[in-house]
Amino acid sequence: MTKPPGSIRALEWLVWAGLGFALVLLLISLFSVFGDSRADARAVFVDPSATATADDPTPTRTGPPGTVSLAEPAFAATLTITEPSPWQSFLLILPELLLMSLLCAVAVPLLLLMRSFRRHDPFAPKNATRLTVIGVLLMCVAAIPGVDAWVLHTLVAGTPLQGAGLSAAEDYRWAPIVSVGVLTLAEFFRQGGKLRSDVQGLV
């Protein structure tokens, strides 16, 4: 049995490293909800045409527990919560939790894919299915902005920032593009597997 190419082994180690990094971030995020130092801020974009807050030169961070405020004016600002409750901290990191969870899920079929490459069997029937799963998971990443919008709406509801035109600073527009590319690649692998089966049937 020939030794797998170094590039395949390097890519597999890279995926393992990424998976470990994502799991560490998940644990840190959960600690920020239930630990003493709760998550109390996140970056947002402000629509200055929707709120006068964007023109306020004196950012504030005071008030009773649960008070929501913008720490910095302008288009890019920081939404802060004074002494947030566990629920508010959870909402602040929910989009990040979803992203890390989905990327960890993507790593599993990707590692199985790398294993088949090491065995010199790239067109194994299961590989097309694995690529399809990866594509669907990446398409789920594209739904995170909807969750983000709901989170921001929930956090500012009933506060002076309600209707302030806040939106998430993170950009997930790459997800559907990559997802379509992976799903297309899955179809290529599916057709390649069928072609291999036909050739083997002729031998």
Image (cartoon, rainbow, N blue to C red):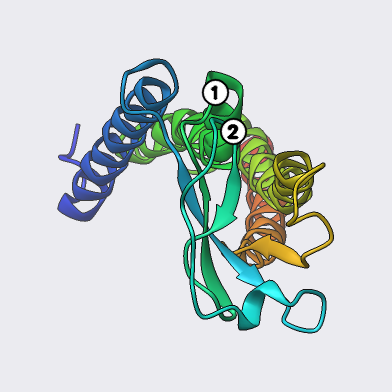
- Furthest-top residue in view? 34
Evaluate whether residue 125 shows in this view. Answer: yes
Q: Name the residue located 77 percent from the left edge and 39 percent from the top edge.
A: 154
Question: With respect to residue 21, does 108 lie above or below?
Answer: above
Mark 2 or mark 1: name the one nearer the start of the chain: 2
Q: Which amino acid, mark 2?
A: Gly
Q: Which mark is residue 148?
A: none
Q: Which amino acid, mark 1?
A: Ser
- Asked whether disc 2 touches disc 1, contact meaning CB atoms under 8 Å apart, the reply is yes
Q: Marks 2/1: CA distance?
A: 7 Å
Q: Which mark is residue 85?
A: 1
* Percent coordinates x, y for residue 32 in the rendering: 38, 27
Question: With respect to residue 94, does 190 lie above or below?
Answer: below
- Given residues 61 and 79, the one toward you in this image is 61
Q: Secondary structure at mark 1?
A: loop
Question: With respect to residue 35, does 58 lie above or below?
Answer: below
Q: Quadrant of the N terminus?
A: top left
The local crowd at label 2, few if under 14, some if 14 to 19, many if 20 or more residues have their Cα within 10 Å, is some
Residue 160: quadrant of the picture: bottom right
Residue 40: quadrant of the picture: top left
Q: Quadrant of the C terminus?
A: top right
* Percent coordinates x, y for residue 106 in the rendering: 52, 36
Which of discs 2 and 1 lies nearer the camera? The answer is: 2
* Percent coordinates x, y for residue 63 in the rendering: 53, 42
- Given residues 87 and 179, the one toward you in this image is 87
Q: Name the residue located 19 percent from the left edge and 48 percent from the top edge.
A: 10
Q: Is residue 62 left or right of residue 120?
A: right
Q: Which residue is mark 2?
A: 66
